[in-house]
Amino acid sequence: MANESEKLTTGPEHHLDITAESAAEQIEKLSQEHEQAGERSIESAERSAQEARIEALETAVSVEASGAERSHVPHEPLALKRRGPISKKERDTSFKNTMKEVQSTMTPASRAFSKFIHAKPVEKTSDVVGTTVARPNAILSGAIFAFICTFAVYLIAKNYGYTLSGFESIGAFIVGWIIGLLFDYFKVLFTGKK
């Protein structure tokens, strides 16, 4: 019988038992490794998320601090701040804040020029002149008319031997400018568009 038990332990059936046992052990080892890897990836994901939260909080604090340095006015949502149309006071305040912010990024010379240009008297004068005297069509027609008329007067004066006084260009510009203003006036009168 000893020979038979030896045959059994060395036979193919015993080999199957060992293989099944080793396969079960390997499956158990792999499942344990898989669980540990999952736990490690969960821990690393949690660690990454925590690092991202800390970085976001630090960024938010630095942005808030830099915003607080720039303006001491607390920012309120627009829906809570006002209702109805924008008042002149709100418009002026918004303009002043925007100008301060933009001028803070300029060079000192540009900042001084910007402050001069955007001063109330200069701005009002510029608006009045721009809407009445310095119309683009008036200036363009004045320049074109001055060129054509001065050139024609020059050719005529050269042909007949006359000398030019220098007022020809200025006079032709004034006539052309008046023609340009009349053109703008009639265009607005007939079309209704500026």
Image (tube, rainbow, N blue to C red):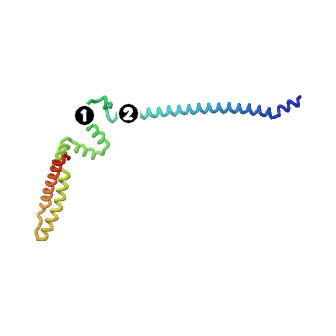
164 on left or right of 40:
left
Which residue is at a point 27% across and 46% down the rendered structure image? 110
Quarter of the figure with the N terminus: top right
Where is residue 192 shown, x and y percent of the image? 18, 46
* Mark 2 residue type: Glu
Where is residue 85 shown, x and y percent of the image? 24, 33
Q: Quadrant of residue 117?
A: top left
* Mark 1 residue type: Ile
Asked if 179 appears above or below 37 in the picture, the reply is: below
Which residue is at a point 28% across and 37% down the rendered structure image? 97
Asked if 8 appears above or below 151 in the picture, the reply is: above
Q: In what element is the residue under mark 2? A: helix
| Circle on res. 86 | 1
First in residue order: circle 2 vs circle 1 = 2
CA separation in Å, label 2 and label 1: 27 Å
| Circle on res. 64 | 2
Where is residue 78 shown, x and y percent of the image? 31, 32
